[in-house]
Image (cartoon, grey):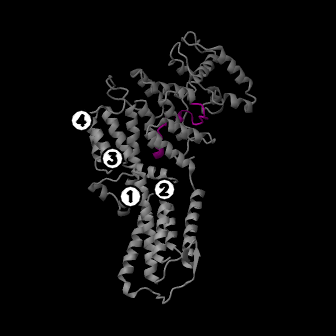
Amino acid sequence: MNYTRTKILVATALFVCCLIALLTLQNHVLFYQEQHTLFLFTGDYFHSRALLDWLSDFVVQFYHIPWLGATITSLLLTAVYLLTEGIIGRLTGLRDWLQLGVIGAVGLYFTFDGVDETPRMLIAALLALLLMWLLSVAAGRFLPIFRPRRALFKKHFSIFGLQLSIPFIISIVLTAAYIYGGLLWEMHDYNRPERAMVRADRAVKAKDWDEVLAITDKYLSTGRTNRLMLYFRNIALAEKGVLLEHMFDFPLRPGVSALVFPWKGDSRDSEYGHLVHEVTGNLNAAHHWAFESMTSWGETAPHLLDLARYNIAMGRPRVAQKFVDRLSHSLFYRDDAETLQRQIDGVEPPELHYAWSGKQEEKIRFINVYNPLRDLMEIVNADPDNHIARQYLKAVLLAANDQDALVTVLDKGATDPSAIEEAKLIYSLYPQSTPLDTLGLTLTQEVRDRFARFRALRSRPIEMEPQFGKSFWYYIYNYCPTGPDKRNSLPSDTIIPGAALKH
């Protein structure tokens, strides 16, 4: 088999392997990078970027369609191999039977295999190789350095009826070794928790709540505690109407901050803090979080989409128009911009529900970024049918171990989830508490009997966890930041990873 066919075979194998790796192992990386990069066809965007950043953003925009972005990136990696092979051939006059170009392509693959990496180095290397190749062509009269007069290794072997030369066999074996070595390195450094968190983020944005629960439950069942995964899970539970029933299925060590992010000026937190305010209809707070996130991460598609939707729902069409105009200059978000434009023009209704829509609102409202209770209480009062906000109000009070406030927001005569029943029992144990009968609340004998068993097992934690590990009682005695005996106190943010994508 001649060298040209060998080169085509190696290039094809490299392209296919890169494509498969990007669409499987690195699919979440494509999504994350695309969500944090927005290429705009405007003069101000071009002038605000260095050339390499501009070219990198241009490539990343195609990650919006994973197979297209993966194909383009795989072609760039294959071009690295072909250019390297061409340069070696022109400089030395020798054929690259060792396939050194494959090493360069595989090495460059690892320069953007993390969520915080971009193809910038790949593009820089590709431009450098292209320049070197052009120089080698221009200096063709002085090259190659070596001029071999006869072919080496003329002997051929017959394998399955094919006449294969020793150099060809060496090339194939080395190519396979390089790619296999790259795969082993990839699997050694593969960040599975990071992949799970990005997949959960994608499912949240797609509003696929069953998928969110499947991903977060699988992650948390390994024993890890991650505030972001708990946060995503609680949003999905609230959307399905079962937050109070399942919020303690996994250890809620972060406390209230697993339900509502406190504002700490952290750029990672700012990416996701708006989500809970969006689902509860508190769009003013959601707008605050999204805008702060945009100041940290720049104009990305999620930021522009969210800010446009929030302003449309809150009746601020002129502000929304600014964000829609920016989206209209992108390649893959023009349809979204057209949809939002129809909402601005009144042709279509707003996509989001605003808790104060059609109601008299204060002219000035200050967002309490540390204590979410005030906003949740105002939302429930202004929008009594807002079931998600009602769930979150009760859930925050449970996580804060604030039974005094909790009993005031419970529906009289209603059948409450077990966590609420358990909180009512704890409330009834305090000597100065108002009797539950006076508040119109009841407590079953079954709950009292369960609490007696819980107290009996306090000295036997191994037996207690299987029976009560998902109960409110177990939470306040083992995980609650304020402890079991502190009341009327919203816990501060504790046990929080330094970054949202940290496990």
- Is there any visible trace of residue 111 in the rendered image? no
Residue at the spot 31% in from the left edge and 24% down from the top edge: 358
The numbered mark at residue 333 is 3
Q: Earlier in the sequence, mark 4 or mark 3?
A: 3
Q: Is residue 181 above or below residue 26?
A: below
Q: Earlier in the sequence, mark 3 or mark 2?
A: 2
The reply to whether discs 4 and 3 touch (Cβ–Cβ < 8 Å) is: no
Name the amino acid type tagged 3.
Tyr
Q: Marks 4 and 2: in contact by CB < 8 Å?
A: no
Q: Which residues are magenta?
A: 247-269
Structural crowding at the residue carrying mark 4, measured as other residues with C-alpha within 10 Å and reported as few (<14), some (14–19) or many (≥20): few
Measure the C-alpha gap from mark 3 to mark 1: 15 Å
Residue 89, can we see it?
Answer: yes
Q: CA distance from mark 3 to mark 2?
A: 23 Å
Mark 4 sits on what residue?
A: 345
The amino acid beneath tag 2 is Leu
Tag 3, which secondary structure?
A: loop
Q: Position of residue 64 (x, y in %)?
A: 39, 50
Q: CA distance from mark 4 to mark 3?
A: 18 Å
The answer to whether 75 appears left or right of 463 in the picture is left
Question: Residue 59 — which label?
Answer: 1
